[in-house]
Image (cartoon, rainbow, N blue to C red):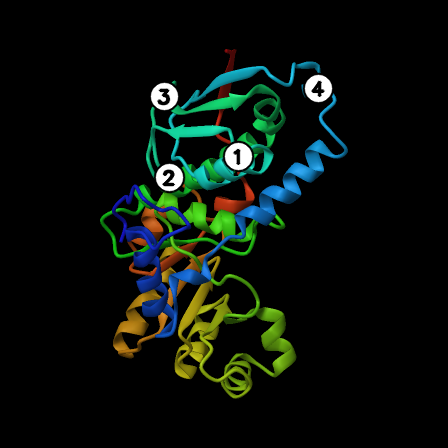
């Protein structure tokens, strides 16, 4: 599953998308899972972004003659993992279907610095009006995919998977989760509706970890249950209740290894996830403790946009 797939477009179930679907089935035990769950509404996202930017009209593009045509080339100034082709295509399609976009790379590819990504040709005004919106999507999603690839590469060769979280840009959750897939990571829950995740305050309010897990089984039968624990004592209570996943929050490496050993001795099917304090410097060591998953909020929260440049030429 960690192998790079160069076709991770949202419009079809690519190798990486299918691999992520298998991962979710394996992780949560949901045989009915379909990769179609991750289907960003690209048209609506682009429409909102264009309306926000253009408003009542692009008064600067209006300075250009309506008949003027142009060609633009898009390059990356740094190595990156590409993600967001469909959002760029949709931006220019909504502004003027006469604009042609020709891609030289695909989502999931790793172009080098100064590589040509695509060529755009058509009426000059809508190209100018759509430039910023298109690049905003592409630089943000490519930034997410790029940092995800770094984390995925860091744990390559282990059995551990890198997961995202719900710490996403409002309105772009599915887009960013798609970018995580393009980078080689896998998706955690999409929202509050598709999985029970019992954290400290939930457990306190429900009467304890075991009581919270039992309540989850009653209230949401068939829904996967994960519980967060902060100590080995809490871990043992949770393990006895057999949730699908136990999240080890801020555990030391020694305690992670101890939890893995106790899970093995119990012959439990519960998976172990690590969260909190994850960096590129320590993620490999964490993966080597034997845990199954590492969730990294920074993939979608601390986004460093890819450095892109659009070069414009009138025709």
Label 4 – label 3 distance at C-alpha: 31 Å
Can residue 232 be seen at all in this image of the molecule? yes
Q: Between marks 2 and 4, how big is the CA–CA gap?
A: 33 Å
Which of 267/56 is in front? 56
| On screen, residue 82 above or below 114 | below
Mark identifier at residue 107: 2
Q: Give the residue at x 74% y 35%.
A: 55
Mark number displayed over residue 97: 1
Name the outermost residue toward the left. Answer: 157
Q: Which mark is residue 115?
A: 3
Q: In terms of sequence position, does the residue under pointer 4 or pointer 1 come before the other?
A: 4
* Circles 3 and 1 in contact, beta carbons < 8 Å: no
Q: Position of residue 195 (x, y in %)?
A: 50, 71
Q: Where residue 199 sits: x, y (%)?
A: 56, 69
Tell me where residue 279 appears, x and y as whole percent.
44, 43
**Mark 1 or 2, nearer chain start:** 1
Q: Residues within 10 Å of mark 1 (few under 14, many from 20)?
A: some
Cα distance between the residues tagged 3 and 2: 14 Å
Disc 4: which residue: 62
Q: Nearer the viewer, mark 3 or mark 1?
A: 1
Total label count?
Answer: 4
Spot occupied by residue 232 in the image (x, y as percentages of width and height): 43, 70
Using a 10 Å C-alpha cutoff, classify the residue at mark 2 as few (fewer than 14 neighbours), some (14 to 19) or many (20 or more): many
Pointer 2 or 4: first along the chain = 4
Instruction: Check whether the beta carbons of the residues at disc 3 and disc 2 lie within 8 A of each other.
Output: no
Disc 2 is placed on an element classified as: loop
Q: Which residue is nearer to you in this view: 271 or 35? A: 35
Earlier in the chain: of badge 4 and badge 3, it is 4
Relative to 24, residue 305 above or below: above
Q: Mark 1 and mark 2: span between their CA atoms?
A: 22 Å
Quadrant in which residue 270 is drawn? bottom left
Residue occupying the far bottom of the picture: 218
């Amino acid at each position: 599953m960690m192998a790079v797939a160069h076709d991770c477009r949202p419009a079809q179930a690519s190798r990486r998308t299918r691999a992520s679907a298998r991962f979710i089935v394996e992780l949560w035990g949901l045989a009915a899972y379909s990769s179609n769950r991750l289907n960003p509404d690209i048209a609506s996202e682009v429409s909102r972004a264009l309306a926000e930017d253009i408003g009542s009209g692009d008064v600067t593009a209006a300075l250009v003659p309506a008949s003027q045509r142009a060609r633009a080339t898009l390059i990356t100034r740094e190595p990156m993992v590409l993600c967001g082709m469909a959002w760029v295509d949709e931006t220019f399609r909504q502004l003027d279907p006469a604009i042609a976009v020709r891609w030289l790379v695909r989502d999931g590819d790793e172009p080098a610095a100064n590589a040509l990504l695509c060529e755009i040709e058509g009426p000059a005004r809508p190209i100018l009006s759509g430039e910023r919106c298109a690049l905003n999507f592409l630089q943000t999603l490519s930034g997410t995919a790029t940092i995800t690839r770094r984390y995925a590469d860091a744990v390559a060769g282990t059995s551990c998977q890198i997961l995202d979280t719900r710490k996403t840009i409002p309105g772009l959750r599915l887009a960013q989760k798609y970018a995580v897939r393009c980078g080689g990571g896998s998706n955690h829950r999409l929202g509050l509706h598709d999985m029970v995740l019992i954290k400290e305050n939930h457990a306190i309010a429900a009467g304890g970890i075991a009581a919270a897990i039992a309540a989850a089984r009653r209230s949401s039968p068939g829904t996967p249950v994960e519980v967060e624990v902060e100590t080995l004592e809490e871990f043992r209570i949770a393990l006895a209740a057999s949730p699908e996943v136990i999240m080890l929050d801020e555990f030391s490496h020694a305690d992670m290894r101890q939890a893995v050993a106790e899970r093995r001795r119990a012959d439990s099917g519960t998976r172990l996830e690590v969260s909190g304090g994850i960096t590129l410097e320590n993620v490999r060591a964490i993966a080597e403790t034997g845990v199954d998953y590492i969730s990294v909020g920074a993939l979608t929260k601390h986004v460093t946009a890819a450095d892109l440049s659009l070069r414009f030429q009138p025709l």
